[in-house]
Amino acid sequence: MDAAKASSRPEKHTLIAKLAAELPASMVLHADEDLRPFECDGLSAYRQLPMIVVLPETIAQVQAVMRICHSEAIPVVARGAGTGLSGGALPLDNGVLLSLAKFNRILDIDAANRRATVQPGVRNLAISEAVSDLGLYYAPDPSSQIACSIGGNVAENSGGVHCLKYGLTTHNIIRLEIVTVDGERLTIGSDGLDSPGFDLLALMTGSEGLLGVIVEVVVKLLPQPERAQVILAAFDDVRAGGDAVAAIIQAGIVPAGLEMLDNPAIAATEAFVHAGYPTDAAAILLCEVDGTAAEVDEHVADVRGVLEHAGATEIRVSRDDAERALFWAGRKAAFPAMGRISPDYYCMDGTIPRAALADVLIGIGELAEKYGQRVANVFHAGDGNLHPLILYDANQPGELERTEAFGGAICQLCLEHGGTITGEHGVGVEKIDQMCVQFPPAELRQFHALKQAFDAGGLLNPGKAVPTLHRCAEFGAMHVHNGDLPFPELERL
Amino acid sequence: MTRDADASDELAFAVGLAHANATPLAIQAGCTKDFLGEAIDGEPLDISGHRGIVNYQPGELVLTARAGTPLTEIEAALAEQGQMLAFEPPHYGETATLGGTIAAGLSGPARPFTGAARDFVLGARIINARGEILRFGGEVMKNVAGYDLSRLMAGAYGTLGVLLELSLKVLPRPGAQTTLMFEHDAATAIEQFGRWQRRPWPITGAYWENGCSHIRLAGASASVASAQQQLGGETLIDDAIFWRGVREQQRPFFATARALWRLSVPPATPRLEIDGECAIDWGGAQRWLSSDADADTIRSTVAAHGGHASVYRGHATPRFHPLPEAMMTLHRRVKQSMDPADILNRGRLYPDF
């Protein structure tokens, strides 16, 4: 380690010594070159070297780390696979980054109770792979599922393509083991379907590492559907596509997935993976229905009828699993496809009522012109969860700033339509100022009071998820409540 | 019919006043669930006048209503549009309200298959103990901005806030439904429930009582028909009456002179060796026990299987399964963060707070 640097930071030296007394030396990283891989998560626009990285492999070691940091008043940021898109695992210069990467084992598969006990560093997809021969799977499937870890999924309440029918992470976990800020181990939830007392399982899910460190997760497993089919529908008008989404839901069908891509997204993904998408369409919808074979036949016919009525210019139904995979290939490759046509992209996550889809898409198009940045839209249409991808070049002076301002304007637009700034990616550091727009001071005060109940010293992931009132005052945000703006008669973008 | 009315401001004022005077409040509306939880003393805070559906757009699968709205009114509005509350809430009386339903966090026979009350909560407007009106969550399907305080309200029995308005996800009613019966003992039922739930069949109810299992199938008509063919069994006529009896505890099994316990356990838990009669719901995960056995025996037996036990009818106390000390401490702190003066339904969940 850099002796000169360590001596300039006595607290770092002390902490290394205390951690080394409890953990093998290989689990405590403190040289700059070892810290570098941890400087950012999936939101790479924000980077910060942590003071120290620890890589424990047992719960007892996590407890020891937390006890030491608590007694030394050192902040701790927990990190899973580091694929998060809101900077939730961004390290702190004066803090410890607690990596759960070594917690990568599936501890138990309980077929009789249809659940699996896994360590937090287990990859999302690895769970479904491990239980597939039992005819079971774990439903939430964020697009990063080959890489993201289940602990991070719980911390962010991750969704995915199939959550319209199967729910978010919060609907698919049974029990958590957590380590508190002062190193105590607690069981949240029970082995039954509910637990006595408050529903702390709901509270912990999506709390972005601010309330405790997740060290074990029991997930619910579902029977694999007998069959799944995808219907691809093209539209020559974004509004018609948006309205078709609401029409499917209104027809009494809850598809397993209902995704939409706009023309820029279609063009980029088609050039990348050649899924056969109609590149002249203004928008395409991908509607997956699953269940028993008989049920799928019934729903495919129903959906086709709705789409025809909604003005689809072309409708294709996947004939086999290979074609179904092909239809999905474009959607799943949408993010990397953007990487091919733009040096950088910035992914937003607003969620709105389905009825507002067309208006918000058109609004985003107008904002793109105003800010002079290109945007492609790929999103979970069935949930009203948008993922506008703003294309930019971080090497061009001013582009990142302009992109962030554009992103802020998209958040505002979602709130004006009765939505939320984040559906599944979390607030992290990225959308912390927009929290001031979504929540009035009284709600923010309540969040802080609740945080105090778990972490009185504010040592767990400070600076993320919930802004201080002081920060909001500086940001000078206009709170938008329930879509009610001051002066509603004025036209806005 | 009583007129819809928004009493938010009056209720918030009353709570603020109670906070200032440290007056304990007993939140009430339909009074159908007073038998659940601990008996409490407090100035009654009546929510029943705060009622009415505020927003319901079937295409959004979202309904927002005031807490005092009768559950029957909500269910009728949904039925008119071919939709439903998929967690199949028990009413336990004609005057049940939406607020009480969510505060008690109760779910009916469909729970393991479609989700619990808390799973369908998208947003909540509440009065905190200081008399401030706060809004968490919203009317959209996915929302991870801020801590999930709206779901935390489900099952908190009003101890963390006065529920004012709730936004729930609703679902289309299934196109077809049928119930199949099988004669077998409890051990076989538990085993079969486990096996059947690993198949992709549209099961929405699995209940065993007195030597007979009832399996409810609901979904697309083709799907119900194909599962029925594979399952076999005897079809039950008028199955809606049967499932209502289970949900509302109106079956003769529940009219017991002994104490009635609710046991929440992992679904594959074997038949528990406790004196008394047992019915099995939720595909094995919820057991109803009518028994004179003492509370400690019941609770330690259930806890050994990773579950917990609460008293529905009878005199045992505490009513809910006791929490480990560290967990109780955390609960007190959470309660303190929402209700520092300890005025909201004090003692309802646990005698300590």
Image (cartoon, rainbow, N blue to C red):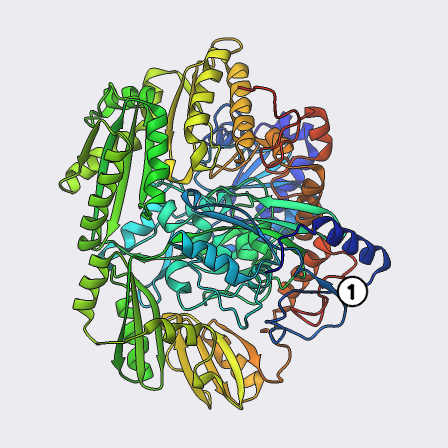
Q: Nearer the viewer, residue A264 or B334?
A: A264
Quadrant position of residue A233: top left
How far across and down, in percent of the image, does residue A120 sit?
44, 50
Which amino acid type is shown beneath numbered disc 1?
Answer: Pro
Circle 1 packing at 10 Å, graded few (<14), some (14-19), many (20+), is: many
Secondary structure at badge 1 equals loop
B200 vs A216, nearest the viewer: B200
Q: Which residue is mark 1?
A: B24
User: Would residue B346 appear left or right of A366 to someone viewing this image?
Assistant: right
The x, y position of residue A110, in whole percent, is 34, 64
Q: Which residue lies at the image location 16% right of the left edge and 37% below the top edge? A: A323
Q: Is residue A262 visible?
A: yes
- Residue located at (69% from left, 30% from top): A472
Location of residue B275 with respect to A187 vertically, above or below: below
Label 1 lies in what chain?
Answer: B
In this orientation, does residue A143 appear? no
Indicate the quadrant where residue B102 lies. Answer: bottom right
* The one of A178 and B319 positioned closer to us in this rendering: B319
